[in-house]
């Protein structure tokens, strides 16, 4: 990484491009009736991924940017689970058949906040309404602080085969500052218990740019994490948006590292993980050389969706729960973000969709280009544009931001082949943004590039 480029481009607020166009461009023009039409039009040979959002935690982590709320009692969680099962049934009835499913992801919040028996029943509802392929990846996000032995057993019984554990930092001072005190022993117990239950794929989530964090504390966190040898690690930069996430106001601005310090932390973590044998994948992932994600990256089969980098190559994504987003051939849909509004719509017998976006041909072309840049650090514009009936020259003319990236050595352009230079890969979002026709209207809503 070059510090001069970090200083030049690092302050830009840019999307993470887990979709294109990004969620700020969704509107109420796409609602429940449109979603119902799109579900009924799913091709008979399509395969799907399912995402289930569980927006509850036992306490609020002050860095959190997710759609979640604190639940001290179990009753609201049980009511929400009933709504999820109803939505699953409603969506399946609109489709009219048991759609094949190759990937399931439980996100949050803390999905493992559910009672173990309820979780088993919920997975049973999915298997009843959809044909979950024997090879399907079933993944779940976990807070090790609240994971119980009974829940570990339920995950194993339900066929969960990948778990993402929130770690963030093992530095006690940082943990206090973000209201997430989590010992190494808690993380180790969760990791070992999951593996014994048959959950073979283990991911860790780390964050840099947190209050009071330093290069030394980041490296110590990596060292401790590597003792447990996770298959994958996601390394995210903390996005401080207190005007949008009001609980982040509990984090003192003066305790946050500046852009250069964030850059140094990101470099140190990446270098340490690569030295330990992990392969850097895209913007923020690292995986062991034999991991399916590494194999997909090397073979050009990596994808990117609302869960980040993925090996998921299914044709569409169906989202369940408050704020959940789905992606169908026609476009995107999103459920009501507030739990009460979501539950009321489901109780009334309606799909919970409140906004979305219908894709244009230009959107589909740019989405393909951006995905390949984010996944492969480059793209052959002739190949992608040719699939969409456009010439590469025309696309290049529509991307004026690209010229400064080329001049600054961030990008090399050889004919129609665009490649992010080795020392500039941390700016892959900046390169992808050069092809974003919707960017200027939503810049203020996104996190810094570095």
Image (spheres, grey):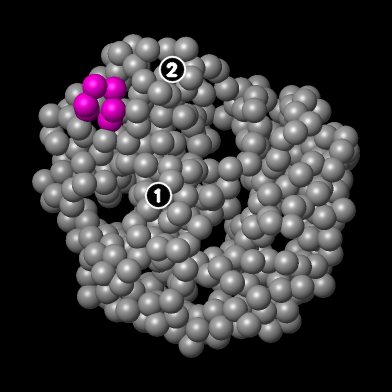
**In the rendering, at what x and y percent does residue 76 appear?**
77, 63
| Label ID, residue 30 | none
Report the residue that reaches farthest toward the bottom. Answer: 185
* Label 1 crowd bin: few (<14), some (14–19), many (20+), radius 10 Å: few
Residue range in magenta is 413-418
Q: Of the numbered discs in the image, which one, if any, rests on residue 298?
A: 1
Q: Secondary structure at mark 1?
A: helix
Q: Quadrant of residue 268?
A: bottom left
Image position, residue 327 (x, y; %)? 63, 35
Front position in the image: 63 or 50 = 50
Quadrant position of residue 286 = bottom left
Give the residue pinned by disc 2.
386
Say which of 299 and 113 sits in front: 299
Secondary structure mostly seen in the magenta stretch: strand
Left or right: 208 as drawn, with respect to 16: left
Q: Is residue 298 left or right of residue 257?
A: right
Residue drawn 34% across the image and 16% down it: 392
> Which tag, 2 or 1, sits closer to the chain's start?
1
For the question of whether residue 257 can be seen, the reply is no
Q: Report the side of 150 relative to 137 (left or right).
A: right
Q: Is residue 241 above or below residue 26?
A: below
Q: Position of residue 46 (x, y in %)?
A: 72, 35
- Residue shown at the point (77%, 52%) measured from the top left: 132
Within 10 Å of the Cα at label 2, are there few (<14), some (14-19), or many (20+) other Cα atoms?
few
């Amino acid at each position: 990484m070059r510090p001069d480029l970090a200083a030049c481009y690092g302050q830009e607020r840019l999307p993470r491009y887990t979709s294109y166009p990004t969620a700020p461009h969704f509107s109420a023009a796409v609602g429940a009736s449109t979603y119902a039409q799109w579900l009924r039009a799913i091709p008979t040979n399509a395969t799907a991924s399912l995402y289930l959002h569980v927006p509850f935690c036992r306490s609020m982590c002050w860095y959190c940017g997710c759609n979640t709320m604190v639940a001290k009692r179990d009753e609201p969680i049980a009511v929400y689970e009933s709504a999820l099962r109803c939505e699953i049934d409603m969506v399946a009835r609109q489709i009219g058949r048991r759609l094949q499913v190759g990937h399931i992801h439980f996100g949050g919040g803390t999905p493992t906040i559910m009672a173990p028996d309820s979780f088993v029943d919920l997975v049973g509802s999915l298997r009843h309404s959809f044909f979950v392929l024997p090879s399907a990846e079933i993944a779940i996000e976990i807070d090790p602080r609240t994971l119980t032995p009974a829940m570990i057993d339920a995950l194993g019984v339900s066929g969960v085969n990948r778990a993402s554990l929130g770690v963030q930092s093992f530095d006690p001072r940082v943990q206090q500052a973000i209201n997430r005190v989590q010992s190494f022993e808690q993380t180790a117990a969760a990791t070992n218990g999951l593996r014994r239950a048959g959950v073979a794929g283990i991911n860790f989530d780390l964050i840099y740019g947190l209050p009071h964090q330093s290069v030394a504390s980041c490296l110590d966190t990596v060292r401790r994490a590597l003792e447990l040898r996770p298959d994958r690690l996601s390394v995210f930069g903390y996005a401080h948006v207190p005007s949008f996430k009001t609980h982040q106001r509990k984090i003192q601005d003066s305790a946050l590292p500046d852009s250069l310090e964030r850059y140094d932390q990101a470099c140190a973590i990446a270098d340490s993980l690569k030295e330990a044998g992990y392969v850097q994948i895209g913007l923020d992932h690292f995986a062991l050389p034999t991991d399916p994600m590494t194999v997909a990256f090397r073979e050009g089969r990596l994808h990117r969706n609302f869960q980040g980098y993925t090996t998921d190559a299914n044709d569409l994504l169906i989202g369940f729960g408050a704020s959940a987003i789905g992606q169908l051939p026609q476009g995107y849909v999103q459920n009501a973000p507030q739990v009460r509004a979501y539950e009321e719509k489901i109780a009334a017998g309606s799909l919970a969709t409140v906004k979305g976006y219908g894709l244009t041909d230009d959107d589909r072309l740019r989405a393909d280009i951006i995905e390949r840049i984010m996944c492969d650090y480059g793209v052959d514009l002739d190949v992608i544009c040719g699939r969409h009936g456009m010439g590469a020259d025309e696309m290049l003319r529509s991307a004026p931001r690209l010229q400064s990236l080329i001049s600054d050595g961030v990008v090399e352009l050889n004919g129609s082949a665009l490649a992010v230079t080795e020392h500039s890969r941390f700016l892959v979002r900046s390169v992808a943004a050069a092809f974003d026709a919707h960017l200027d209207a939503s810049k203020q809503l996104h996190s810094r590039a570095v």
